[in-house]
Amino acid sequence: MKFRDEIITSKSNPTVMRVRSLTEKKYRDEYGLFRTDGVKLAAELFSHGIVPELVLFKESSKEKILSRIGEKFPDCDAVVLSDAVFDRVSEEKSPEGIICEVKHLDNHGKIATINKATLFFHVNERIILLESVRDPGNLGTVIRSAAALGANSIIISSDCADIYNPKTVRASMGAIFGINVLTTEDLALTVTELRKAGRKVFAAALDRQAMALDRVRLEEGDCFVVGNEGHGLSQAVLDVCDAKVFIPISVGAESLNAAIAASILLWEQKRQLG
């Protein structure tokens, strides 16, 4: 790593102010950057071969972190902040002492041309779709579950939470660095095109016409789409799916959290298809 000579002691330092601003979406978009906080995310970032634009260390924790992560550190710029300044910048309740400033990822993009985008997917590539999942913690949890349970890609509507929100990144526990995330302006059209490509798309919905998940026989290429935490899926998306499914739960229980529901659907797909 290439450390700058000085230790930053001013909260108004331009580097400090830029990194702090990355908690807000408008600045993440403006700079094309996002941030990770903590040793775990830094190690995952490096393990995926992603080189940060800048690594910030807490002065009192620098040597401990360098010895802990060791050879995984890439060749990139680094700077040391005084403890007081670092604690002001950190998003962690108990800062571990490392923050990475990272360019937007190559495996995250927008579906600009639906027909071309569907050709990108291999016939056996597993996909889960999300509509209007607004909570960044939920989105990050789905990303984590998708990576753990064999999904290759996630397609999200443009009104979902920002994938670069620090809460999304943290909840993904680093899975966000290795899975494809595509954003679409028209999820209903995306579902239609996936079906034209030969896939079945199942809507997760509490509906009289819905089938219980344990009665659905899945095939490779089948997809699930999960909706908003409070309102579920839009009628436009429901209308273009092949069928509706629900997850049986105890009588009188509240409906499942969107991230939990998505995780169960992914687990069932993995259980049936391996």
Image (cartoon, helix red, strand yellow):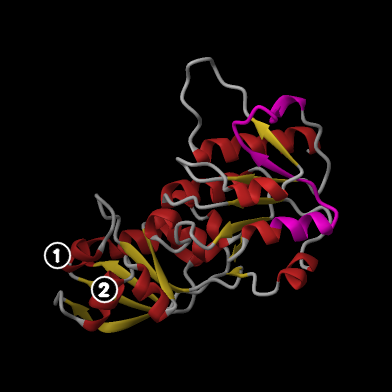
Amino acid type assigned to the residue bearing label 2 in the image: Val
Quarter of the figure that contains the N terminus: bottom left
Quadrant position of residue 153: bottom right
Q: Is residue 261 left or right of residue 87?
A: right
Front position in the image: 67 or 10: 10
Amino acid type assigned to the residue bearing label 1 in the image: Ala
> How busy is the neighbourhood of tag 2: few (under 14 within 10 Å), some, or many (20 plus)?
many
Q: Is residue 120 left or right of residue 267?
A: right
Q: Residue 210 colored magenta?
A: yes
- Tell us which disc is closer to us: 2 or 1: 1
Front position in the image: 193 or 18: 193
Q: Which residues are magenta?
A: 191-215
Q: Is residue 147 visible?
A: no
Residue holding disc 2: 80
Q: Residue at x 40, y 61 (%)?
A: 165
Q: CA distance from mark 2 to mark 1?
A: 12 Å
Front position in the image: 34 or 207: 207
Check the image and name the residue furthest to the top: 251
Q: Is residue 204 visible?
A: yes
Q: Secondary structure at mark 1?
A: helix
User: Which circle marks residue 84 in the picture?
Assistant: 1
